[in-house]
Amino acid sequence: MHTHHTLLLLLHCQLAMASSSCAAAMAMSLFMAACSLAAPGNFHQDFDITWGDGRAKILNNGELLTLSLDRTSGSGFQSKNEYLFGKIDMQIKLVPGNSAGTVTAYYLSSLGPTHDEIDFEFLGNLSGDPYTLHTNVFTQGKGDREMQFKLWFDPTKDFHTYSVLWNPRHVIFMVDGTPIRDFKNLESRGIAFPKNQAMRIYSSLWNADDWATRGGLVKTDWSKAPFVAAYKGFNADACARGSPKYCDSTKSGWWNQELDLTSQARMKWVQKNFMIYHYCNDAKRFPQGLPPECSIA
């Protein structure tokens, strides 16, 4: 747990206990419920396995989680908490070898037809061919903001950290600390931004060979099953189930974080060398005109 967060929590607890005011104690209780302080994750404590009939497993005293896929079923899990703004990190080791047809999805989402969503999806491929990293942002139920990348490393050889930095100004996608995409708050220009709906973290491993690899031309080779993806190192420096004002009061570094010039240069390098699709460059897909954010620098 970060030292400044620990000190802040202790200070507030001491004040609440010293006060004879029931209202003050109640306010402190709400504060503690709203703020999820950064701490190394434990999958038993932080997540529920939601489907897969035993194909998802929590191992090593909660330090490791694996998802598996076979011809019968995939598997998935979700966070116990919902988050409204924060920095979310997860280390993932993707399905090795011939993973064509499989999708490993890792995302934040609220519920309902007007949901918000922040997506990482890893589209498998034939042995030796790179994965495709598919990203998307939904606001009030509307997506169609896909950006896709080839990674600059083999994501099946070791664990790599995939992060979302989500604050009132930005949704920033990061890989091993390198930003690859920045979805900015442009509400002043009439463009919706995810800021009012708390989201859970979800992940699943499933078969999507009707579209995932080369548009569905390459099918899943079930002789290679079970396919397994592994997770560790979850960390949420984020606000859970509470008002964003409580997040602000913690003075967390991510609350006002922007990309500095060095980070902007790193993101441009990734987008120049490894981006393979950007929805703003696909005029054929939007015959009525590109989405409005595409015209804003």
Image (cartoon, rainbow, N blue to C red):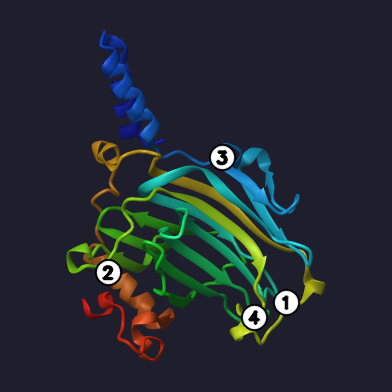
Tag 4: residue type?
Gly
Where is mark 2, residue-wise? Answer: 264
Label 1 element class: loop
Which circle marks residue 128 in the picture? 4
Lower sequence index among marks 3 and 4: 3
Label 3 element class: loop
Question: Viewed as shown, does residue 278 lie left or right of 71?
Answer: left
Q: Could you tell me how far apart the alpha carbons at marks 3 and 4 are, in whole angstroms? A: 33 Å
Which circle marks residue 220 in the picture? 1
Question: Viewed as shown, does residue 204 lie left or right of 285?
Answer: right
Give the residue at x 50% y 53%. 90
Give the residue at x 37% y 78%. 271
Residue 215's quadrant in the figure?
bottom right
Label 2 element class: helix
Give the residue at x 17% y 64%. 188
Which circle marks residue 42 in the picture? 3
